[in-house]
Amino acid sequence: MLGSALNPASVAIVGASDNPHKVGGRPILYLKRYGYRGAIYPINPGRATVQGLAAFPDIASLPAAPELAIVAIAGDEAVGAVEACAARGVKVAVVMTSGFGETGGEGRKAQERMLAAARACGMRLIGPNCQGLANFATGMVANFSTIFNELEARDGPVAIVSQSGANSQAIYTLLRDKGLSARHVHATGNEADVTVADLAAAVVADPGVRLVLLYMEAIKAPAMLAAAAREARERDVPIVALKAGRTASGQKAASSHTGALATEDRVVDAFFERHGIWRASDPQELVSAAELYLGGRRPRGKRLVFISNSGASCVMAADYAEQHGIPLASVSEGAKVRLRGTLPAFAALENPIDITGALLGNPELFGAVLPIVGDDAQGELLLVGLPVAGTGYDLPRFAADLAAFQQRYGHAVAVAAPQDAVRRAFTEAGVATFAREGEAMDALAQLAAHAELLRRPAPPPLNLPPLGAKPHFLNEAESLAMLAQAGLPVVEHRLCREELEVRAAMDELGGELVMKTCSRELPYKSDHGLVAIGVADPLAEFRRQRERCLALGARFEGVIVARRARGGRELALGARVDPSFGPLVLVGDGGIYLEVLKDFRLLIPPFGEEEVLAKIDELRIAPLLRAQRGQPARDVRALARMAVKLGEAIIAWQGRVASVDVNPVMVFETGAQALDALVESRADD
């Protein structure tokens, strides 16, 4: 159905204006200017012609049902127009009118009426409150943006899909500033029906698209976005996304802007990473690496070689690389011997490589150094910094040498130069260029990291399990039993319902004991003083906890007696089923600090141990888990195995479990075990 949105055979404009600079007039201007070949039907009951085209009083009077209709009239009239379009058999309606879901209660009701009319007749709805669509391959520009009047559009290999119309223009402008063109520029507005994800799936299927850029304030169709990402991976079409609303303030602003629902930001991070979507932080970063992506190279490593004719640039590049975690490639001894025979005696042979100002008098130096770097095969990324390279420098030769290097060795290559003329010479040779060295290094690092992400096995299609009954907590004994059945190691313990069982547990477990009240009605036992560590008199403690539990009016299901675990580090695992994104697994710092410091990472199962280890290494506490100052390293791989098992379990439980908290998990020098667990079940008892 969305094929009718991108390449309709006919377009009607409800509210068509003879003024090409009004909302109802600009789409007609663009359709004619950009070569749209289908039928154009202006709808305006007050005019016989609009912009030289025969006009019609209403949608019902058209000679045939248009495939796509643009609605550019206000308020309740827009709702009536959508209803008329649906009844006439229009396949897609683009509603530019604002004043609906983004304004509050009454606007939401009007939007719901509009959507109900569309769905009743099988019509897709884009908007309302949207700037519209633009497909420059077909000239189908159902859009009122001013930018296509100011920056003449050209068909290109990039697709832009944005919830925000203004941001679609900003992204388009930034691309054009880099000399790149977009085929698709689509804005979805309130997303009453069609979402960014829906249009992303449509543009990914376009064989002329080689890069997709997304802007979202809410991810309303994760399964569709996951499907789009899967097809994009198969076609080697990178997706870079900007998801706004990272903070509480941003989420509040997004809600008032488009009626978007806030999504926990770390869930979005995990979702994007799992599906091979690179997350950008702002529109500039969204387009920064576009030239590199379109170059088609997918580096298999992240090591960077930096070459410059400026020693200062080399020093600053080394600083920047270390500060931003960009690994600099080493230079082998054999390569140093070759460089020593090529460069002036005072040149730096380490990476960054300073070919010095001698480049001005000896243009052969550049072409001589490049194959030494390529043959050395120590790096996958190459950045050439030319802070000064004007008159007297053989730029065409340098550009030809670098283009040949790029072709021969397959490195991802970029040039950083502040002078437009210098950059132009390399751009014309097919080399990505940047004005600033830091920006170029970031873009190369992004390309390499994204390529690594896309080499991971594609996840299975997102399948949201049907949720069971209203959630309720299991008691701790039941929760630990579920974990043990799933293959997670749990602390040795006994559930004691009477004093005789406490005596037996004391004999069987021995040593220091931990005692905790077991009651599904008191899931957070420590809040009520129902956890005791290093108990001196277990029988007296049993009686105290039983009395305290009953005094709170809770059902007493016994006391858990466990052997006290020592010599480990407290970490945490967790899992839950997100209603939009499906199963999630948490790994992070444990104990009482988890909720305060929020030092954790999320993963979307299924995943492997190496993925968990990478996430553990991102934690702020990661250095404390390694061997240092006589302290042994913690067995984080044992924790990773537990996380994998928990991920498999939350999938296998198929919506019968809402959430699992395993905190703390004690991680020892060898091994790890769950000391506490709380399962929120959706299974019927």
Image (cartoon, rainbow, N blue to C red):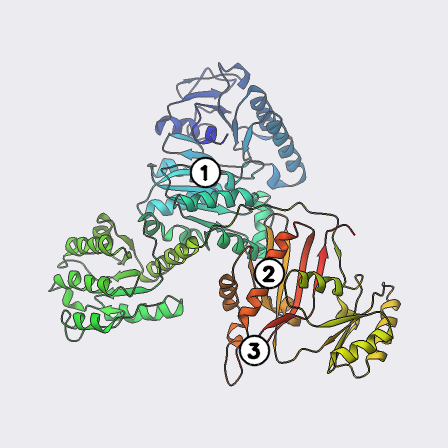
Instruction: Give the mark count.
Output: 3
Distance between the alpha carbons at the discs numbered 3 and 2: 20 Å
Identify the residue under disc 1.
Answer: 186
In this picture, residue 338 sits left or right of residue 497: left
Please determine whether, in this image, residue 68 is positioned above or below residue 393. Answer: above
Looking at the rendering, which quadrant does residue 486 occupy? Answer: bottom right
The CA distance from mark 1 to mark 3 is 54 Å
Name the amino acid type tagged 3. Answer: Glu
Residue 669's mark? 3
Foreground: 250 or 639? 639
Look at 88% across and 72% down and name the residue there.
547
The dot on residue 645 is 2
From the top left corner, tell me how far across and down residue 541 is, in percent: 83, 78
> Disc 1 or 3, which lies upstream in sequence?
1
Is 315 placed above or below 49 here?
below
Q: Amino acid at mark 1?
A: His
In x, y percent, where is residue 415?
26, 57
